[in-house]
Amino acid sequence: MRLVVIAGAIATLISFLGTPLLINLLRKHGYSQAIRASEEGRLYPAHEGKRGTPSMGGIAIIIAVLGGYFLTHLVTWRPVSISALLVLYLMVGLGLVGFADDYLKIFKQRSTGLRARTKLIGQAVVAFSFAYLSVQFPDASGNTAASMAISFVRDTSIILPLGLFLLWVWFLVTATTNGVNLTDGLDGLAVGAAIMSFLAYVLLAIWQYGQNCAFEVTEFCYNTQNPLDLAMVAAATAGASFGFLWFNTSPARIFMGDTGSLALGGGIAGLAVLTRTELLLPLLAGLFLITTLSVIGQVGSYKLTGKRIFRMAPLHHHFEMLGWPEIQIVVRFWIIQGLCIGAGLTIFYAEWVRA
């Protein structure tokens, strides 16, 4: 537990002190994201006040996460683990894909960034490599960081062949990263919701550490590899996001951009795979799922019936178009995320109690 607290504290401090430096650097060079403006036949929420706000703030989050994790291991002189390195690899890899997208938005002033196909290919390369590496490097007991069994609160009896396992992890990573990316449309909304998800994984991984099969093999122990290190990564990411949120709340002084949203989404998906809680992810990332479904519903309804369900998708922009204040939308959506995570953790704990 001490290591988890240290990792979170270091990451929070790095992010809190480093984000203002990044803001000043980006402002000095005029690196700000293009803002979509309303035009004839296409209305967007009034975000002119956000014009000139620096983007690519995800750089500060990623640096803080890496600093929190590695400095903790350096201070305590403990070896790093494969499981934690895999999650960090997924976050950094997807962060680089997001950085390329932000580069086009900022330097080319193209609000759409990378083409959708190019972004998906970049995400797929990182996701497939993460999935493949996660079932390599067995420990002394022959266990690997991930299991090719589909998991709920622990591994189920459904074991996938390698090809389907790679596709399954790719789907989880792509869905989660794009969910966070779609949610990142209002000041503080996505990063605040992500903090809740990472804190949930801190609790979940610490519980798995205390009941781990590495200490005592029982019928209901957890086979999660290196759960304490996974808790450290989750705590470091939550801490880094906390430090960043201070400057990202309304009115935001910086946006995290795709660099941050893809990295955070990758971290959530990676923790779901390595803690063997894949089917619990829809609850632990509930707001991101709801946001994604609102976009799917909007597009599907328009193509099938010619009518839109919402005034604008993703869902938070619908409420903006209804006249809700931005802060009110953000806080209420955070409440929804908290309720989803509460339900997920309840199911996780109830399974252990019942067992």
Image: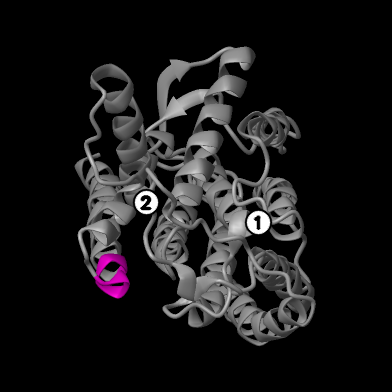
Residue type marked 2: Leu
* Residue located at (75% from left, 54% from top): 108
Query: Residue 116, located in which quarter of the rendered image?
Result: top right
- The secondary structure that dominates the magenta segment is helix
| Nearer-N-terminus badge (1/2) | 2
* Residue located at (36% from left, 38% from top): 295
Q: Which residues are magenta?
A: 325-330
Considering every residue shown, the one lying at the far front of the view is 40
Q: How many marks?
A: 2
Give the labeled residue for mark 2.
43
Residue 334 image point, x, y percent: 30, 64
Give the labeled residue for mark 1.
259
Query: Residue 13, located in which quarter of the rendered image?
Result: bottom right
Distance of mark 1 from mark 2, alpha carbons?
Answer: 27 Å
Between label 1 and label 2, give the one nearer the viewer. 2
Residue type marked 1: Thr
Q: Is residue 242 magenta?
A: no
Front residue of this view, candidates 41 and 95: 41
Secondary structure under tag 1 reads helix
Residue 280 in sight in this render: no
Residue 235 in sight in this render: yes
Secondary structure under tag 2 reads loop
Residue 23 vertical placement versus 161 (above, below): below
Q: Pointer 1: residues within 10 angstroms few (<14), some, or many (20+)?
A: many
Residue 265 image point, x, y percent: 53, 49
Judged left or right of residue 285, residue 125 is right
* Residue located at (68% from left, 64% from top): 62
Residue 88 image point, x, y percent: 69, 53
